[in-house]
Image (cartoon, grey):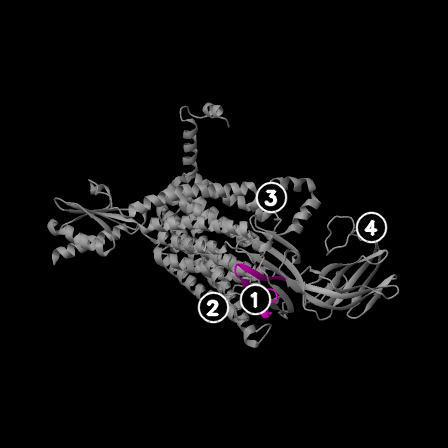
Amino acid sequence: MSEKEINKTSAPDIGAIGLLRWAWRQLTSMRTALILLMLLGVAAIPGSLFPQRNQNPQKVDSYFNTDPTLAKWMDRFHLFNVYASPWFSAIYLLLFISLIGCVLPRTFHHVKEIGRKPPLTPKFLNRMEGYENVSVDPSSALENAKKWLKKNHYRIRVEADSISAEKGYARETGNLLFHLSLILILIGVALGSLFGMKGEAILNVGDRFINTPTSYDNITYGKFQGQGSLVPFSLTVKDFVATYDPITGEPSDYVLRTTIADPIGSNPKPVTIKVNKPWTHGSTKVYLQANGYSPVVTVRDKSGNVTFSGPVIFLPQDSDLSSLGAIKIPDMNPQIGFIASFIPTAGSSEARGIFSTYPEVLDPRLVLSAWQGNLGLDSGNPQSVYSLDTSKMKKIGLKALTLGSTYDFGVGSITFYGWKSWVNLQIVDDPGKMYALFGAIFAILGLLISLFTRQRRIWVKVGEGVEIAGLAKNGIPGLNEEILALKSALENAGES
Amino acid sequence: MQGRVDMSSTQLAYFSNNAIYACLIIFTIAFFAHAFEVSWSVRNVESNDKTEFDFEKTKRAGRIGVAMMILGFGALLVAVVTRGLSAHRVPWGNMYEFSITGALMLTAAYLFAFAKYKVRWLGLPVSISVLLTLGTAITVLYRPSAPLVPALKSPWLAIHVLAAIISGGVFLVANLVAATFLLMERYEKRGGRPAWAAKIPSLDDLDQLSYRLVAFVFPLWTFAIIAGAIWAESAWGKYWGWDPKETWAFITWVSYAAYLHARVTVGWRGRRAAWLCIFAGSTFLFNYIYVNIWGTGLHTYSGL
C-alpha cells in the first residue's frame, strides 16, 4: 500500500507512523493474540488429516497418482507440508511477535512494580469486597493488623490511619516466566532446524557404516549446517535380535549389538542400541528405527557364472513381516529382474495364497516372479531399489523357493541361500533441544506458580471504628475467608 | 519374562476381565439410582398445576448412587491393577487398557469433585460415560493381555500416559459440567428448570466449577505433552514431529489455553466460555477416538 492509499482508507491525520503504531497495538492486543492462538490450532488440523511429505511420502505420491489435479492444487496450498508452509509459519511468527510485544513491556513493568509499595487505601472501603466492621480498640488495631499481615507474607504500606497490603505478586512472575519460556522453546526449535542434521541409513547385519554424507540413504541439513560437520565415527552391525510374543506375534524386544569406533580409527567398543536407548555423542544421537529381512540369493547365467550374489534389502509389508523387494541383474543380456516377496514363516490358504503367519524366520519362502527385458536403469530417472519398472520387460516365470532350493528360469538360475536382518539407523543432530527442554521445564514451573498463587489486596482503616475490606484478582475465591481470619485475629488480640 | 505364560498371569487376566463385568453391573446400578433420585422426587400436587418435588423421598437413592460410584471405583481399580500384574507391566499398552484406566480416572475426578463441591447430580452423566467407555472397551477394543511392543518399553510410558489419562478424565468432567450449564441456562431462559434439575447448582457455580477443573488440570496436560516430547526424543529421534496424535494434543492445549485466557484476561463467562470449554474437550475426545482408530502415525500400536 502506498502512503496515498493509506491516507484514503484510514482515519485522517495519523500518518504512516501513527498507522504503524496502531497496527502494533492491534497486534499486541489480547484479542488478536487469542485469535492467533485459535487460528494456530485450526491451522494445525489439515496436517493431521492429509499425509505429510516428511512423514509419509508414499501416501503423498498415491494422492498424486489417484487425482493429479486435486493433488497439485493441494500442494499449491502446502497441504502436504503444512508445518513448514508459509501460512502456518506466518501464524506462529505473528503470534510470537504479539507475545513478545505483550510480555516484554509487562516484564519491565512487573520488575518495577515488585520494588514498589502497594497502592493507597481507597477512600470508601464499604464498596470493596468482603467488607467487615471490627469492634476493637482502634488504637492498637493497626499495629495488630500489621503483625498479622506480615506473618501472612503480605507486603504492606502503612499510612497514618490505614494499612494497604497486597500479596501474590508471584502470580504475575509465574505468568511472565511461562510466556518467556515459550519464547525460549521457539528459539530451541529454530536452532534445531537451522543448525541440525538428520539422516537415515539401512544396514545389513555385518555391514560397516562410516559417518560421512555418502553413507546415508537420505540426509537433510539445517540451513546453516555445513556438510563437513558430521561427527567422525564408524559403526559395525554385529548382531540384531528381535523377540516376539508367541501368542500375539507382536514384537517384545529389539536388540542391536554394534561396535563403534569414535573417532574413526580408534579402538572399536561394543555398544548395544535399543528402541528407547539411542547411542549418544554430544548432541548427535543414533537411533534404532526399523528392521526387516534381506534374503541372500545367488544368480547364475546359463553357463553357471555368478552374475549376482548377496543380501537384498526387502521392505516389510505387514506385522508378520511379509516383505517385498526387487532383485535386479543388469549384467545379463537381456537384463533380468525379479519382483519377490520374502515370507518368514509360510502359511497358505485358498484365498490369500502363501502368506506369513509369524514375524520370526521359522519356515521361510522366497516367492519370485522373473522378468526379462530392459531394467530401465540407464533412463536417467532415479529408480527405487525396492521396486521393478516392468514397463519394458516381460514376465518369464513364477516360483516359490524354500531355503536352499534353486529356480531355473531358462536363461539362468537363482538360488535362495539364506537371509540376514537389516536395521534402519536414524542419525540426528539437534543442538537446540536443550533450550527447548529448559523452556518446557520453566514453562511448567511458571504455569504452576501463576495458576496456584492467589493475588489479593487487603485494607485496614481506622476512624470511628475499624474497617477491613479486600480485592481478589480475577475473582479468585478465598478472600472472604482471609478477611474473616484477619478479623478474628484482631478481635483476639484486642481481648488479650 | 518375554512370552512367558504361567497360570497366575492368565488367572489374573481373567480376574481383571471379570472385575470389568462387575463394574458394568455396579455402574448400571449407580446410573439407575441417580436417575431415580432426580426423576422420582417429582410429586404432582392436584390442587394447583405446578409440579413440586420432594428430595427427602429419594435421598436414599442418591446415597446408593454415590455408594455404587465408590464401589465401582474400587472394582475398576482392582481391574486395572490386575490387568497390569497379568502382563508384568503398567496397564497402558493398548486402547482397551487406556479406556479402562480412563474410566477409572473419570470416576476418580467425579469422586474428587463430589467430595469437594458436593455435586452428587454429576453422578448421572458420569455413570453413563463410564458405562459407555467400559462397554465399548470390553466388546470392541478388547485385546488379550500381552507384553509391550519395544517402543513402549520406557519409564516414560507410566509418566506420560498416566498424566494424559488423568487430564483426560478431568477434561471430560469439566465438559459434562459445561454441557449441564448450557442445558440449565436454556431451561432458565424458557421460564425455569424442570423439577428434576432443581438440585443442580446455580449457573454461576457450574460456570466456576468447569473453569476450576480446567485450570487445575491444564498444567498436568502441559506436562503430559512435555513428557511425551522427552520420550519421543529418546524413542523416535525428535521431540516433536507433528504426528497426528501430537498435533491434536497441541490443538487441545491451544484450545484450553485460549479458554483460560478468554476467562482470565478477557473476562468471558457463561455460555461463550462453556462452548469454548466443550470445544476444547471435544478435540481431546477426537484425538482419543479418531487418531487411535482411523489415524496413522507413530502413536498407533498393536492394532489398537
For image coordinates 43% across by 43% down, the residue present is: A99
For image coordinates 73% across by 59% down, the residue present is: A325
Q: Which residues are magenta?
A: A262-290
Front residue of A349 and A177: A177
Q: Identify the element where label 2 is drawn.
A: helix
Amino acid under disc 1: Leu
Of discs 1 and 4, which sits in the foreground? 4
Which residue corresponds to mark 2?
B78
Amino acid under disc 2: Val
Which residue corresponds to mark 4?
A392
Q: Tell which subunit mark 3 falls on.
A: A
Which residue corresponds to mark 1?
B148
Q: Quadrant of the C terminus of chain B?
A: bottom right
Q: CA distance from mark 1 to mark 4?
A: 47 Å
Same chain for mark 2 and mark 3? The answer is no
User: Could you tell me residue A135's position as x and y percent?
Assistant: 14, 50
Q: CA distance from mark 2 to mark 4?
A: 65 Å
Rendered image quadrant of residue A277: bottom right
